[in-house]
Image (cartoon, coloured by chain):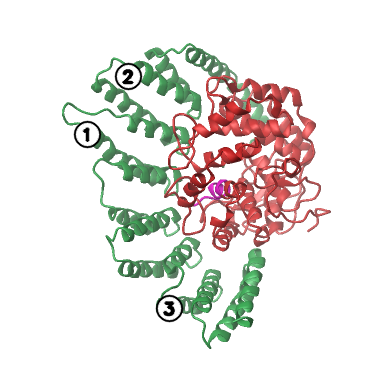
Chain colours: A red, B green
Amino acid sequence: MAADTGVEDGAGNYEVTGIPPLIMSTHLLVPLHVKYIQGLGESKDDLAYHLTAHLRLNAIYWGLTALSIVNHQDALDRDEMIEFVMSCWDEEAGAFGAHPNHDAHILATLSAIQILVMQDALDRLDVPKVVKFILSLQQPSGVFAGDSFGEIDTRFSYCAVSALSLLGRLHELDIEKTTNYIIQCRNFDGGFGSCVGAESHAGQVWVCVAALAIMDRLDVVDVPTLAWWLAERQLPSGGLNGRPEKLPDVCYSHWALSSLAILKKLSWIDADRTISFILSAQDSEGGGIADRAGDMVDVFHTVFGIAGLSLLGYPDLLDLDPVYCMPAATIEKMGLRKDWQALERRTTSES
Amino acid sequence: MHGVKRQTQQAIVDRKQREKSKIEGLLKLTDAVLDRKKGKDWSAEAFDATTQLLTVNPEFYTIWNYRRNILLNGLFRESTPEDINELLSGELALTMKFLQSHPKVYWIWNHRQWCLQNVPQGPGSDLDGWRKKYWAFELQAVEKMLNADARNFHAWNYRRYVLANMSVPRPESSELTYTMKKIESNFSNFSAWHQRSKVYTSLWHQGKLDPIKSKEKEFELVRNAMYTDPDDQSIWMYHRWLVGLGHDKELLEREIGVIQELLEEQPDSKWCMESLVHYKRLILTNYPSDRDKDLVADCVRLLDQLKDIDSARRHRYEEIHRAVVNISTHP
């Protein structure tokens, strides 16, 4: 468990020492991350770029959110982005695929809506049609399917709740039915799984807790037990894992920390250590953040690392809304802010 | 990307050079398959093209959708149940192959599930014959996946799905044997502990097991595990579930005694202290008495130690500290 920590030697190299990095060894490399995200659309000479086409809209949402939190929302061309989103529209289904000519899916649809909201371009959307698509995916049990083929997951319930709320159409949702399914996914450790019977997992905890927050149904959460379980996700390295006795990973900085912020228990972990864990996973040459120090970066870990830093009060970042995983100012302007609590923004990176 | 080591700039340049022809091939194949899809081509050739593309990229969900549509709108039409069975058999073999190299890809598990739901009736007058055969095999298949990675939550979810849908249901109690095997090979397998909690809850609920007797056996198991590895949080979390809300005072006091004893052997054990605080608080809340002052003092002493040895969660201990003191000042 202790061997997961890396310490920087000052030149951007890391070695495994087994000793938790207690000192903030570095800072957030904002210009490099901006450059890294800007470069993502131009990495067409990379096989991985093409093999992740099925995640393209999600990736754009991740990139745009990361840029917004580091206060560089304009680093990507707005019109080009909106045109790309609209080119992913699947007219037959009435929703978005992840890429032009890919099938509609609720995951890509939420990303598209989030991007359009952040770019203030919701007027481009056929709202009644997409609302119809989302509502059609609710199953008799109350859970949502991802598409017409019927795979179910509480992740899809979150997508539905978040999307409807962003579109101002939450009143069309059967909240009782949606909540009841989530309640059935609650486990003895206070956490939630992907479907009835499934093990608690920090990612699934976040989708369930955030969906409940949007529906104003946090009353069904056993807060002391769940916040305890979430706080125990932090390992001596400062990083957080997603389940007991697993390795830490930067993306849980978002899943677990956002959940804690919604439960107003973010102070239950050691912020300084998590901050240095996230910073240690940066690529100090090419930009971007990885799951752990020394690994290959990607935009998914980049946004969730930055999201975690924002919630922990890292200096000079904009506030992230942990319920929607979007800039807090955007959500506030729409009148959708829920009662969460992040750590106070620090003025310098000294702890 | 999870757990993929970072490359040097030179290695990236070299890799990109090598990937050039692969990218060209992938793009050509993708365009060809998506064109067929657009033209609603439900032919066997189109089906083979999807196999080729999914072999390169099993996460391409649109292609899985297209493949199912080819089956439904093309290959299944005018097919005998035997033919359909043959096709689905092939699908199961293909997804198994994919899962071995991509055990965490949702779309593959999803496709496998869809195949099983579409197994036709037969052979002949034995309406459930094929289904029985497949479902029995599924359990072995998923066990193989869990042998490779005992924490793969996709595999555990699939296991529960299979168990719930087998044409000849297995007695639920056999799942206790399976999870025990998993726990014995690794106490830290929280997925197995979790599964046990679900199986027991269901068996108690149906009146198939005596909760008191079976809990006693579990306490014994957990006690062994605690002594073997007192730092393993899975065990302590499971223990907390067994104790529950603490409506059995005698049991609560007995377990406090057991943990206290372990703490004497392991004076720095965070989990001993943390659990003692929790259980003592249950006594304070459920059974107020004139011993409360001592219990509060115990909790405060343990919490002070915890703030020290588990400083990352200091604020949580401080919050509990305030709550405990509050109980004692407002009886």
Looking at the picture, does residue B24 appear above or below residue B298? above
Chain holding disc 1: B
Cα separation between marks 3 and 2: 63 Å
User: Would you name the residue on which mark 2 appears?
Assistant: B76
Of the pair A346 and A161, the residue shown nearer to us: A161
- Does residue A207 belong to the magenta stretch? yes
Chain bearing mark 3: B
Q: Which of marks 2 and 3 precedes in the sequence?
A: 2
Percent x, y of residue B227: 43, 70
SS at circle 3: helix
Sooner in the amino-acid sequence: mark 2 or mark 1: 2
Circle 1 residue: B128
On screen, residue A260 above or below B316: above
Report the amino acid beneath label 3.
Answer: Lys
Compared across the picture, whether B113 is left or right of A303 comes to left
Please provide the residue range marked out in magenta: A200-208
Vertically, is B153 above or below A227?
A: above
Q: Residue at x 50, y 32 (%)?
A: A136
